[in-house]
Image: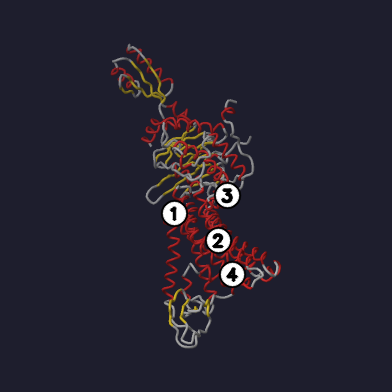
Amino acid sequence: MPESPPLLRTHGLTKRYPAVTAVDGLDLEIPRGRVGLVGANGAGKTTLFRMMLGLSHPNEGSLEVCGIDVASDPIGARSRLGYMPEHECLPLDQTAADVVATFGELSGLPPRAARQRASDVLDLVGLDEARFRPVGGFSTGMRQRTKLAQAIVADPELVLLDEPTAGLDPMGREEMLALVARLGSLGISVLLATHLLDDVQQVCDHVVMLDGGRLVVAGTTGSLLERTGLLSVDVGTERGPLVERLAAMGLTATASAGLVEVQVQGDDDIDTVRDAVAELGLPLHRMTTRLTSLDEVFLDRAGRA
Amino acid sequence: MVGAVYDRGYRPYDGERGGRSAARAALFRASVRRALGLRRPWRQKVTASVLLGIAVVPAIVNVGVAYLTRDTVASDIEFITYREYVGVSNALLVFVALTAPDIMCPDRRQRVLPLLFARPLTGVDYVMAKVGAMFAILFAFSFLPQVVLFVGQMLVSDDGALAYARDNAEVIWQVPIAVGALSIFFAAIGVAIASLTSRRIIAGASIVGLFLVTSILAAALVGPEVASVEGRTGPPATVITEEGGVIVVAPGDDGLVTGEPGFGSSSTDVYFVQNDATPAALLDLLTLPLVLRDLVFLGQVEDTHPMSGLPNGGLYAVAVFAAVLIAAFVTLFVRYDEVER
């Protein structure tokens, strides 16, 4: 099987608006799979999506979507993409089945195939019962599912999801994330834009972090978390001496809420902590590694950048 | 595979996939369905049904009367001519004001545009599909009644169907051209105005407003009707009313009026009164397509039109018509070009 081109490859991609540079000299190569695009509001996520769809043109640089140069063939790029915008975007006076089938036709499916696919994807997102009801009467969760359904109705290579969990209650959020996770197994790559790192941590195998239109860090979710861990050590009340001792050994440690928290990188650091506790003769009640949330990676990296 | 249990219903799609033309056709179909209220609650079907009813009733009445009066002296009376019937389509203005906002504004208001333009579809495709949908409906709704009229007249004609068809053969090309000009005119203007706002009510009011304002403006420029009856002989007649290029006069003392009467009755006669020919009348967007219609049917501007008698009046009319269409399309293309940037 020939190696398929990356989902997205950009070179020096820059988009300036009169008041702000939304994307600033971005060099990226995003592999297939489920990729999280993380950044605060205004980090350039939506602008990047719009440029991928050819709805917005870069001032400088180039971008390829699924191996297609967007500037020279925006229609070709679009026909491989599904797009779920963040905002409300559904016609409200039609049934979900009609809405999704219409968008299927607009993506180039023949009418009969579009209706069949609409029924399939609505089933997939859990709206099989509700598909003949008007979208106007749907809850936020159902609308989000309908938006996802229209994005995948034409079986795209890549689906762009812009904040798919926005406005959902915890249950709805979990269900939406489970759906996103499943898209990967259906052969649809996912680019998930969110400011909620938890979402990415839960379903994505790659992470791209943006801040102010620049790349902060990119890599597999696992590698980013491995490199930076937080070790919680419960040694009773004698926390001060341990903190000092660890500082002397070159580790950053803080005493907080009955625990000593130590920044560790890899197993060696964990051994060092164990040794320090032993040398001080402290009781080791509990020692747990809490995987650093991506939030911390982000804040850490963004702070340094 | 565990996934197979849960992923029931989902299969990758490897069938036929169209490009821009398929997307354009799909948007056209979706817009026609929207305008006619198909696959939507009955309330949305009312406008279209009522319009079709209004458009077809005169044809049916006309054919019915022709049938009832066949083989009598009255059978020669034509209640409505094909040319006049194209004018009945002016009722289409109301339909356009209700429907064009319907197929344009929700896309903006409900923010569907980004979803549409994430498809293999350009701004030009969007405009063509929307104007095309409006045009197709207007054309169908103005053309269908004409077909009813023609076929009906053919069937009830005293001289036989074939003879009727032969005698009226010219309408077979006149009607589609005139109806087409009228439909593209209303469709392009209606859709262009509706594209400027996301509020349907504002769009609808603006469409009606534009036609009314140009109509009033043109009337003001053309000036008041001349209160005299050209070509009339005999003692002065008393002017009773004057309205829309028609002046109604009471007969003179001798009980006679001469000239070119329109309809007559025992107490009053109706004369067409001409102003000085002026192209200002072309500003009237409401009647502009009817001037085009007259060029098709009569080969000239109609006698009662304020522009009648103006040299090259027909050319002026065609030029203004084309300019209005171009303005509408330029508005639309500019409006939907931005979406791509």
Camera-side residue: A245 or B5?
B5
- Residues under labels 4 and 1: Cα distance? 35 Å
Specify which label sits upstream in the sequence, 4 or 3: 3
Q: Quadrant of residue B165?
A: bottom right
Classify B307 as above or below A302.
Answer: below
Q: Chain of mark 2?
A: B
Question: What amino acid does circle 3 point to?
Answer: Ala
Do the CB atoms of the residues marked 2 and 3 lie less than 8 Å apart? no
Residue drawn at (54%, 52%) of the image? B36
Specify which label sits upstream in the sequence, 1 or 3: 3
Question: What amino acid does circle 1 point to?
Answer: Arg
Q: Residues within 10 Å of mark 3 (few under 14, many from 20)?
A: many
Specify which label sits upstream in the sequence, 2 or 3: 3
Q: Given this view, does label 4 or label 3 mark the residue nearer the observer?
A: 4
Do the CB atoms of the residues marked 2 and 1 lie less than 8 Å apart? no
Camera-side residue: A44 or B42?
B42
Q: Where does the N terminus of chain B fall, quadrant-wise?
A: top right
Specify which label sits upstream in the sequence, 2 or 1: 2
Dot 1 falls on a residue whose secondary structure is helix
Task: Tell me the tag on residue B200.
Answer: 1
Q: Residues within 10 Å of mark 1 (few under 14, many from 20)?
A: many
Q: Residues within 10 Å of mark 2 (few under 14, many from 20)?
A: many
Q: Quickly name the residue at label 3.
A: B26
Specify which label sits upstream in the sequence, 4 or 1: 4
Camera-side residue: B340 or B148?
B148
Q: Quickly name the residue at label 4.
A: B81
Residue drawn at (46%, 52%) of the image? B105
